Image: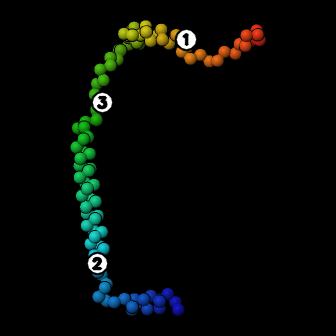
Amino acid sequence: MDAATVLSVLAGQQAPEDVGKAGPIGLLLTVLLAIAIWLLVKSMTKHLKRIPPSFDDEPTGVPVPDSPAGLLEPQPGQQVLDDLRRAPRAIEPPRTDRGDGAGS
């Protein structure tokens, strides 16, 4: 048998009253999709309300010097930071001297 005869036999076995009916499963899927879309729209609306009206950067309050000389002016606490940078490390690497004078 070729494909055309198989299709014609299968089409002849289908009852004409069942053609085009979706049934209760189709109704259930449609209702579930409608509920899902409603929940997504509700969530999206809630998130869109949280967006600020403008995305322009607000001033941070950090003064920016007008010239390079302004960068060299001492800032409050700068001396403490410089001292900490020059301080020895809190955790030193292991020492290699063995006490017999053969250390490096």
Q: Amino acid at mark 3?
A: Asp
Query: At which x and y percent is residue 93?
Result: 62, 18
Tell me if mark 1 has few (under 14), some (14-19) or many (20+) residues whose alpha carbon lies within 10 angstroms of its own: few
Q: Secondary structure at mark 1?
A: loop
User: Marks 3 and 2, Cα distance to the nearest angstrom?
Assistant: 56 Å
Query: At which x and y percent is residue 96?
Result: 70, 15
Q: Nearer the viewer, residue 51 or 83?
A: 83
Q: Amino acid at mark 2?
A: Gly
User: Marks 1 and 3, Cα distance to the nearest angstrom?
Assistant: 40 Å
Residue at x 28%, y 78% (from the top left corner): 23
Q: Which residue is mark 1?
A: 88
**Residue 55 vertical placement versus 66 (above, below):** below
Query: At which x and y percent is residue 74?
Result: 39, 8
Q: Nearer the viewer, residue 27 or 55?
A: 27
Q: Secondary structure at mark 3?
A: loop
Tell me if mark 2 has few (under 14), some (14-19) or many (20+) residues whose alpha carbon lies within 10 angstroms of its own: few
Q: Which residue is mark 2?
A: 23
Q: Which residue is mark 3?
A: 57
The reply to whether the C-beta atoms of the residues labelled 2 and 1 are less than 8 Å apart is no
Asked whether, in this view, residue 89 is left or right of residue 14, the answer is right
* Residue 69 visible to the viewer: no
